[in-house]
Image (cartoon, helix red, strand yellow):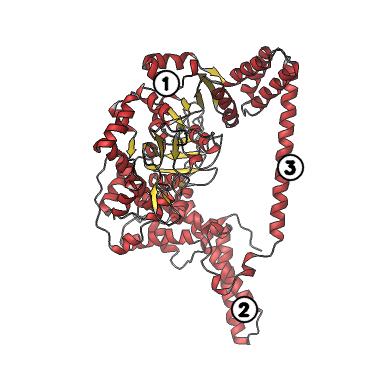
Amino acid sequence: MIKKESIDKVLDTVRIEEVVGDFVELKKRGTSLIGNCPFHNEKTPSFHVSVAKGIYKCFGCGVGGDALNFVMDLEKYSYPEAIRYLANKYHIEIDEVERSPDQMAKQDKRESLFALSQWAGKYFKDQLWNSDTGKAIGLAYFKERGYREDIIKKFDLGYSPDQWTAMTDTAIKEGFNSEYLKEIGLSIERDDKSFYDRFRARVIFPIHNLTGRIIGFGGRTLKTEKSVPKYVNSPESEIYHKSDVLYGLNFAKKPILDHDSCYLVEGYADVISMHQAGVENVVSSSGTSLTTGQIKLISRYTKNIVILYDGDAAGIKASLRGTDMLLEEGLNVKVLLFPDGNDPDSYVQKYGSDAFKNYIAEHQEDFVFYKTNILLKDAKNDPIKRAEVIREVVQSIALIPDEIKVSVYIRQCSSLLDIEERVLLSELNKIRIGKSKDREKKESQRQAELSAERDMPPADLFLNDDEITGSPSTASVTINAEILQERELARILLNYAEESVNWEAESEMPIAAYLLANLGDVTYEDQATDKIIAIYKDFVSRFELPEAKLFFTHQDREIAELAISLVSSPYELSINWNDDKRKIYVPEEKENLKELVHQAIYRIKKRKIEAQMFKIREELKTELNEDDLIIVLSKYQKLKEAEQLLGNLLGNTIVK
């Protein structure tokens, strides 16, 4: 368990813009930094980072938090994992106290899987560097490939001995769960329930997540038998999802941002060789087809991608298959083919770093034009094939969301294909109309399915009484006028709690104390608001005030999310206002605190009075004796007078 002092030190040190900037390309806008949200797919930035407040907020999907929340949500880390990640980023040593057996028993399964993967990475690395067979076979293989020792260590390369159960036996002896070994694919279960090593007799390429933690492995055999697969990879698991992982991205994200460009290659060896050549803005899809998840990962850091493939027919076809998805996501795509059947790895080994860098700088070609030329070569003078080429090229152009790019491609492809622009535009429109109809059809089907679901009886009709558990989610709270009024009160506290009540003569009372004193008997419908106000009450009772940061970083996400939403806004006053040239002055909210605070108090009190009046009206529907009726009517009359007074003070309420 991490000591509180260490946690506080980490949270005091982290800079929100540095943590988020490792994953999102941020640009300055007013007092905020903005970028494309990493939590949902968007092309127009709605993700804001406030450096002053130390928080982020997406006004598209609604997520928000501090640096710790960001790491937890993006990487699916537990609280301790996120603290350790941030501590490692800022080189902070963390002190931990020994956990009790009960605490260890409750250890999160996901964290256990991470720990096991990390241990396995160290095991394979130790075998490579310290065992006789590892040095003689594994290390010798990597050095024969031309890899320097620093590169081998950088990528945590390893070796698994040619024994059936060496790693499995060691892991179980170390206390790891055999079921976890099976779950993340380090071991395979036999029919008799015993286990053996998946990666035996292979050199190991650990696969890291964005933050550098090992989540899976690739193993290459050194045997020449055709019956033995060349590569074996970790299966899907709770911590490893192939479609959302790019090999080498943990090392490449900063270089990609620096160069505003990403090289995409096929295999582990290509990435490693390019790093050794000094080209670090490179990632690999690990030999699998490119997925939407992987494309979104790249687009967080750059819109410019260069695909490097083998110079053979298979490499050409592979580049054509995977690239339309990149165009659809709005990326600028170039392609580079290596001559004489080389791939990036073999070209570096054969010609050296300088020749490699020069080649990739000089031979990049725009994908659309490259595709057009390649297909035209295959079609030759066959008119039917040429017509198919035109259709296929226009289909790729139709995927591009940027209309200016589309116009440029249509014009240039018109020359390449020797066909009029209007013909290409006509085909483009046909394709787009067809896609639009397909989308409408799918949407209609989806709406029909939703309607059918709404007509189904509620699921809880089929539940037994003992199956009904839990409490209503805060996400299902209906936002009404009362809740908005309560949240406005919380917003004032978060923004102005420490400001003085300067409209009262000789008063140094802070606004927090003034508000709470005037609303001491009020109960709150909104749970999150009630929690925030309870914290303020506790501090005020000790003649203290909490910092707003306490709420932004609160472990109760309901409190943190509401607090961040209340202090965040996607809008800022234009620099064209409040300047000397135009002589237009827009007052800030802080200058009208008296009215702001009083309005909040009056609205809450009026709501309370209206609730009491409603109860009396319900009571009047029952039979009352004459004395009770007089008392109730007298009470109602006083409440009515108070309601009218508050309505007049608010100035915008008509009391019937």
Please tell me whether mark 3 or mark 2 is closer to you in this view. Answer: 3
* Residue located beneath label 3 in the image: 441
Q: For numbered disc 3, what is the local secondary structure?
A: helix
* Residue located beneath label 2 in the image: 619
- Real-space Cα distance between discs 3 and 2? 55 Å
Q: Amino acid at mark 3?
A: Lys
The spot of residue 499 in percent (x, y) is: 38, 50
Q: Residue at x 41, y 48 (%)?
A: 72
From the viewer's perspective, is residue 434 above or below residue 508? above
Res 78 seen here: no
The spot of residue 475 in percent (x, y) is: 54, 56
From the viewer's perspective, is residue 171 above or below residue 346? below
Answer few, some or many: residues within 10 Å of disc 1's Cα (few below 14, many 20 plus, some between 14 and 19).
some
From the viewer's perspective, is residue 385 above or below residue 462? above
Q: Earlier in the sequence, mark 3 or mark 1?
A: 1
Per the rendering, the mark at residue 346 is: 1
Res 655 seen here: yes
Answer few, some or many: residues within 10 Å of disc 2's Cα (few below 14, many 20 plus, some between 14 and 19).
few
Q: Is residue 25 left or right of residue 175?
A: right
- Real-space Cα distance between discs 3 and 1? 48 Å
The spot of residue 644 in percent (x, y) is: 59, 64
- Closest to the observer, 605 or 569: 569
> Are the residues at dot 3 and dot 1 in contact (C-beta closer than 8 Å)?
no
